[in-house]
Image (spheres, rainbow, N blue to C red):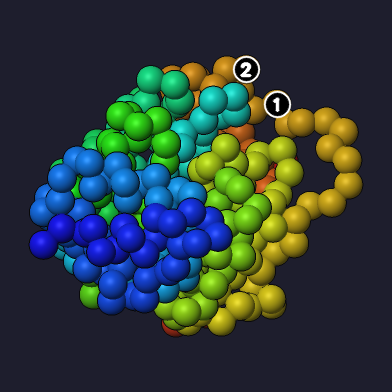
Amino acid sequence: MGIASYIKVIGRGRDGARSLDREQALDLMGQLLDGRVTDLEIGAFALAMRIKGETVAELAGFVDAVEARCIPIPTGRPTVVLPSYNGSRRLPNLTALLAMLLAQHDVPVLVHGPVDDPTRVTTAAIFRDLGLTCAHDGDDVAAAWKRSEPAFIRTEALCPPLARLLAVRDVIGLRNSGHTVAKLLAACAGALTLRVVNHTHPEYATLLAGFLAATGADAVLMRGTEGEPVADARRLQRLDVYVGGVARGDLSLPAQEGVLRQAPVLVRSNAASTTASAIQAIVSGAMPAPAPIAAQVACLLRVLDVLGTPMEGAPARVAAQ
C-alpha cells in the first residue's frame, strides 16, 4: 500500500502541512514498523515529521502502534517505567540510582533503552557495572523483580521494530518521531504503569502534557537531566504529576528556585564504573542520596499510594544531603 498518501499530507512544510488523526497515525506507524514501506519512504516520513512536528493525536496513534508490537511484560502491581534513551555526556547518569532506590521500597521498576552509545554513558552500562543483568524477555524482567531489583530491557528486545526505526538516525543524522514515542511507552501489559516522561526541549512540555491528558495517563512529566528521567542531583526540576490524565498540583513538586551556589560532590567522573560505585554507596547507606533525587523518589511513592497500592516503607528511608 505504501504511505505516499500520508506523506502528501504531512510533507508540505511547516505552514502547508496538515495533521493526521489518531487512526491515520496508527496505520502509518504500523506500516513503518512492519517493514511494508521502502527506505525512501521512511526517510521522507522522518524529515516531514521533523519539520512539521507531531500533534497529540498523531503521538497517540504512533504510541498505539508501537505498544501493540512490544513484547508482553506482565505485572500484577503498579510499575514505574523509566525510559532511558539519552544517557549522559557531562553529568553522572543517575537513572539507575532512581531505579534502585524505588526498588528498595518494593516497587517494580522497568527501565528500557539502548545498550550502547559511543558518545554517551548509557544506563545499561551502569546497570552492567552494578552487576545487574539485562533482561531479554518478560521472564527475565519478572526474575529481576523477584530479586527486588529494577529490570533493564534493551529496546531491541522490548520492541524490535521500534529499535529499527530509531536506528534511522544513524543514517540521516536526525531524530524522528520514534524517539518521542519511546519516551511515552507504558511498556507493561495488563497493569497500572506510572511513567516518568521527560523532555529536553521546552516546547515539548506542552505537547507531552496534552498527550498525557488526552490518553488518561498516570505519569510524572519533567525536563530531563541531559535527557534522562531522573532529577538533577544539583537542583530539582519541576515535577508535574498526572493521574488518569488529570494534572494533580497537590502531588506535583515545584522547581528549586534561586542560584545554585555549590554543587554537591557526588563523583569526580561520569564514567559508568565511577557512577556505579557512587550509586552502590548510596544504596548501601554509606552515602546520602542527593536531595533532588530523594524528593523525586518520595514524589513517585506518593503517586503510587494515591493510585491505590501503598508501598511498604516511608519516603524518609531515602536520606538526603
Residue at image location 42% in from the left, 36% down from the top = 174
Residue 5 appears at what percent x and percent y? 25, 64
Q: Compared with residue 158, is residue 59 higher up or lower down, i.e. above or below?
A: below
Q: Which mark is residue 180?
A: none
Residue 187 appears at what percent x and percent y? 29, 61
Whether residue 231 can be seen here: yes
Q: Quadrant of residue 253?
A: bottom right
Is 279 positioned to the left or the right of 113 in the image?
right
Q: Compared with residue 218, is residue 128 higher up or lower down, i.e. above or below?
A: above
Q: Quadrant of residue 234?
A: top right
> Which quadrant is the C terminus positioned in?
top right
Q: Which residue is more in the foreground, 136 or 78? A: 136
- Whether the residues at callouts 2 and 1 have beta carbons within 8 Å, the answer is yes
Label 1 Cα neighbours within 10 Å, binned few <14 / some 14-19 / many ≥20: few
Give the Cα distance between marks 2 and 1.
Answer: 8 Å
Residue at image location 42% in from the left, 78% down from the top = 215
Dot 2: what SS? loop
Q: Which mark is residue 265?
A: 1
Dot 1: what SS? loop
